[in-house]
């Protein structure tokens, strides 16, 4: 048996929608499918102001431009995340202050955030690992108390909730990813959501390479002109067509993923109770989006042995992030920093295969081999 770590899911609508775009002759942004995708986000999540971008990284770069960062400004970010959570702010000249993960979750620890807040803090960016919400009550409270902008890297978090509110709706701005590794895919693609409307006008300029083309196309100005800095952020219609095909099947995708996630959780809970490893702990099990299934091994050595054992059995697994405070880039620029929880997840977390086309038989086989590893 060979079980890959990930497989993209196709709804069946991708090819006809792509064909429709090609035959329409309008391949650039804002043709047939981009508005349909944006309407979907408005209808389902009340995201009123959205920009379909070439990637989540691009959406985060727009966010960083919109903050108008000055030398000396600091951004508080989780260390246990992908580089795109922080690179866009470094590109704008900000300094990153890394916060630790929680002892029971890879998500950012609000106490660690609180300890880093000072007069130079310009924003706090959080990342909802595996589509499981950060402690948004505590983080919103910090943002209000110190009047610091809150941002969400919601790359993992499409169709995930906290307190019945969609993730991506808590912060001033948030960014989603439709990269091939995520729950719904556009090949490459992303979404910027503007919740705080003070950023909206400038976002339209930056999105349109610094011009007021949006206002021009609405007939609000007689000509379009260069108004601000900006870049090329818009997703092509080909990506939007693929994304819309996936959105049309979102409920199927999510129910398959959730059933598999729950099956893993149930089948592995007795080993977790015997403390062979830790399972994810959720603030609210109903609200996550089953983006990833992971276990946390007791040591780096045990994780390496387990993944090698599973590989021998034909099962592909994957480690995840390096703790960014330990990365060569950060270590060379900033004094060494020790963040015990982020480093523990970097060393010990192992992701198991999870995708809509994984069968229950395959999942049982994976569970069986994990049991065999620990019990022999
Ligand atoms: C995937 C991912 C990104 C980047 O998404 P792209 O669409 O590939 O740019 C950013 N942050 C996190 C946490 C991610 O997992």
Image (cartoon, grey):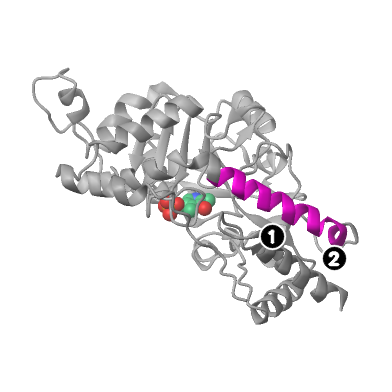
Report the label total: 2
In the displayed structure, would residue 59 be above or below residue 322?
above
What kind of element bears circle 1? helix
Could you say where residue 265 lies in the image, as x and y percent from the top left?
76, 53
Could you say where residue 111 lies in the image, as x and y percent from the top left?
72, 40
Q: Is residue 350 visible?
A: no
What kind of element bears circle 2? loop
Could you say where residue 286 lies in the image, as x and y percent from the top left?
70, 37
Residue projecting furthest to the bottom: 312
Magenta-drawn stretch contains 271: yes
Could you say where residue 363 lies in the image, as x and y percent from the top left?
69, 63
Please name whichever residue, 170 or 186, is drawn nearer the observer in this view of the structure.
Answer: 186
Give me the residue at 43% from left, 26% from top.
42
Query: Which portion, as a residue range, is magenta?
Result: 253-272
Give the number of the disc on residue 276.
Answer: 2
Magenta-drawn stretch contains 344: no
């Amino acid at each position: 048996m060979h079980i890959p770590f990930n497989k993209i899911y196709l709804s069946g609508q991708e090819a006809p929608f792509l064909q429709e775009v090609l035959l329409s002759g309008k391949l650039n942004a804002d043709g047939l499918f981009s508005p349909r995708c944006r309407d979907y986000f408005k209808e389902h999540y009340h995201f009123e102001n959205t920009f379909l971008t070439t990637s989540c990284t691009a959406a985060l770069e727009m966010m960083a431009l919109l903050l108008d960062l000055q030398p000396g400004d600091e951004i508080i970010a989780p260390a246990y995340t992908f580089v795109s959570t922080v690179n866009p702010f470094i590109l704008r000249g900000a300094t990153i202050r890394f916060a630790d993960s929680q002892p029971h979750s890879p998500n950012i620890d609000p106490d660690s955030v609180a300890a880093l807040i000072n007069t130079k803090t310009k924003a706090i960016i959080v990342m909802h690992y595996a589509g499981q919400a950060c402690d948004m009550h505590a983080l919103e409270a910090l943002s209000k108390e110190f009047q610091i902008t809150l941002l969400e890297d919601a790359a993992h978090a499409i169709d995930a909730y906290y307190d019945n509110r969609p993730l991506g709706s808590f912060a001033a701005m948030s960014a989603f990813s439709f990269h091939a590794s995520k729950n719904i895919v556009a090949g490459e693609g992303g979404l910027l959501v503007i919740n705080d409307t003070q950023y909206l006008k400038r976002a339209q300029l930056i999105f349109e390479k610094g011009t007021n083309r949006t206002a021009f196309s609405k007939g609000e100005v007689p000509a379009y002109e260069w108004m601000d800095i900006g870049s090329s952020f818009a997703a092509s219609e080909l990506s939007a067509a693929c994304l819309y095909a996936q959105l049309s099947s979102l409920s199927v995708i999510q129910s398959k993923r959730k059933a598999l996630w729950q099956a893993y959780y149930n089948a592995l809970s007795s080993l977790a109770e015997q403390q062979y490893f830790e399972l994810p702990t959720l603030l609210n099990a109903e609200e996550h989006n089953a983006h990833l299934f992971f276990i946390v091994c007791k040591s780096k050595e045990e994780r390496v042995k387990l993944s090698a054992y599973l590989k021998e059995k034909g099962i592909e697994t994957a480690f995840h992030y390096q703790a960014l405070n330990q990365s060569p880039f950060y270590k060379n620029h900033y004094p060494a920093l020790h963040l015990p929880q982020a480093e523990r997840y970097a060393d010990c977390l192992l992701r198991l295969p999870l995708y809509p086309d994984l069968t229950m038989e395959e999942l049982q086989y994976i569970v069986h081999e994990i049991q065999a590893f620990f019990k022999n």
